[in-house]
Image (spheres, rainbow, N blue to C red):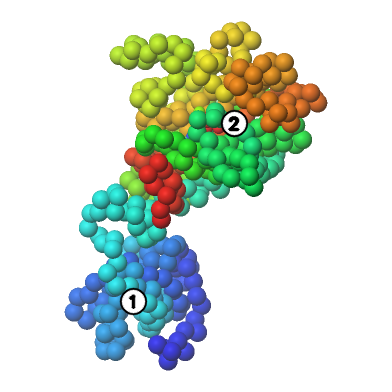
Amino acid sequence: NLVKLKGFKVKKILIKNVKSFINEDVRLDGWVYNKRSSGKIGFLMLRDGTGILQGIFFKPEIGELLFNEFKTLTQESSVSVEGKITSNEKAEGGCEIQVKNLIIHNISKDYPITPKEHGTDFLMNNRHLWLRSKRQHSIMKIRHEIIKATRDFFDNNDFTLIDTPIFTPNACEGTTTLFATDYFGENAYLSQSGQLYNEANAMAFGRVYTFGPTFRAEKSKTRRHLTEFWMVEPELAYCDLNEDMEWGEKLLEFIVKRVLSNRQLELKILGRDISKLEKIKAPFPKVSYTECVEMLNEGGFNFEWGGDFGSPEETFISEQYDKPVIVHRFPTQIKAFYMKRDPENEKVVLGMDFLAPEGYGEIIGGSERESNLEVLLERVKHEKLPKNEFEWYLDLRKYGSVQHAGFGMGIERVVAWICKLPHVRETIPYPRMLQRLRP
Ligand code: 4AD
Ligand code: MG
């Protein structure tokens, strides 16, 4: 192999760029995705993380020695090849490489994930390897695109990215889903949301967003809940509920458009019906919680005003539309302490949820925030929250309090919807759920 290394004097390139190197000699580094041979010709499907390319090993040209080395290759062995890129209409991607030289770095023995069908549990236990498969690879590429689009959207619209802490002394989204950890003798909780800090940041910068991992001790097994998920949260000073909705609409439209233009190949691999995504254009339908209750009861549910929507209710509501639907003005009793009450009806708050179509349910949750000190104090007391831990937050209502609003979008829920996946466990590289901490 060392002798052959001498031959590797050509340019090292990525498979995604091979089209620009037709008739040139190049080097590719990757792993064996698949392999077969017929008589004097060996076919190697090489993957390098950016794409898959067919390599041709033609025995009369490369000789017996190299051809025998090709024969030893197994699925997921790591190799470098050198050869000439040629165009071939029949090959995947329109190109292939006529291999002249090969280095084997590691022969993979008994790779556990074979082209046959495997159960979900087996695949989840082998998540560290499963990520190499075409389908998982496509999902992660789309996840990357969604995150990049999200950040570009806010960056292009004068939002400043301000990071918020993960160790916190208090709850943002209710005390039942807190993860506690020992912080030098006192309890610290893993952040459920950066919102409260984000509100302080908005008073300093006007438009801000935070993006990071958030944690919730979700004790139920559903296809929508993770215990660790990534959330992007914009917050705006001088913003009301209507404007808040508009930002959410514009964001989702932007994300979908970007995925459609940059990730066609991946959507195709996933078999995604693109026509459904092409319909995602603002404005989106808006219905109040109260109207949703009527809709549910007409649809055969027996739903009482005042309750929280669960997955079946959300699925039913979102299935009525081919765009995300914005549900607003929820009962005060089911929503967080910081949501502003509707001045026209104290029983409801100026909160909103975006429910994704095709039955996906909530992907965004947000609200206008209570900006009045007395009302907020009363809400903190009513929820039995430790007032001393909220002193700094209450300061925001003492020093230049203004109307403000924001929302949180769960990245994994958006990935699940855009890729049309049956479960959020495939939307994040290493999912954390009730019964999964490994690998
Ligand atoms: O509706 P939520 O709880 O809202 C908040 O946390 C607000 N503080 C956000 C804000 O206004 N700044 O969560 C927001 C979104 C949900 O719509 C959902 O997409 C996602 O976060 N989410 C989860 N995703 C995966 N697993 C879970 N357990 C999730 N809980 C919420
Ligand atoms: Mg919510």
Residue 284 visible in image? no
Which label lies toward us, 1 or 2? 2
Is residue 429 visible in the rendered structure shown here? yes
| Residue under the point 39% across and 34% down | 220
Mark 2 near ligand 1 (CB under 8 Å)?
A: yes
| Mark 1 residue type | Ile
Residue 172, percent from left and from top: 59, 31
Q: Is residue 158 left or right of residue 232?
A: right
Q: Quadrant of the C terminus?
A: bottom left
Residue at 41%, 35% (x, y): give it. Answer: 219
Secondary structure under tag 2 reads: loop
Judging depth in this view, the residue of 4 and 409 nearest the camera is 409
Q: Is residue 420 above or below residue 391?
A: below
From the viewer's perspective, tell me whether residue 434 is left or right of residue 330.
left
Q: Position of residue 342 (x, y in %)?
A: 61, 13
Above or below: residue 341 compared with residue 179? above
Q: Is residue 395 left or right of residue 432?
A: right
Q: Quadrant of the N terminus?
A: bottom left
Q: Residue at x 62, y 25 (%)?
A: 385
Q: Using the numbered discs, state the Cα–Cα distance from disc 1 to disc 2 in whole angstroms.
A: 50 Å
Whether pointer 1 and pointer 2 mark residues with C-beta atoms closer than 8 Å, the reply is no
Q: Is residue 229 left or right of residue 206?
A: left
Q: Residues within 10 Å of mark 1 (few under 14, many from 20)?
A: some
Q: Which residue is mark 1?
A: 107
Quadrant of the rendered structure where residue 396 is? top right
Report the residue that reaches farthest toward the top. Answer: 344
Label 2 belongs to which residue? 172
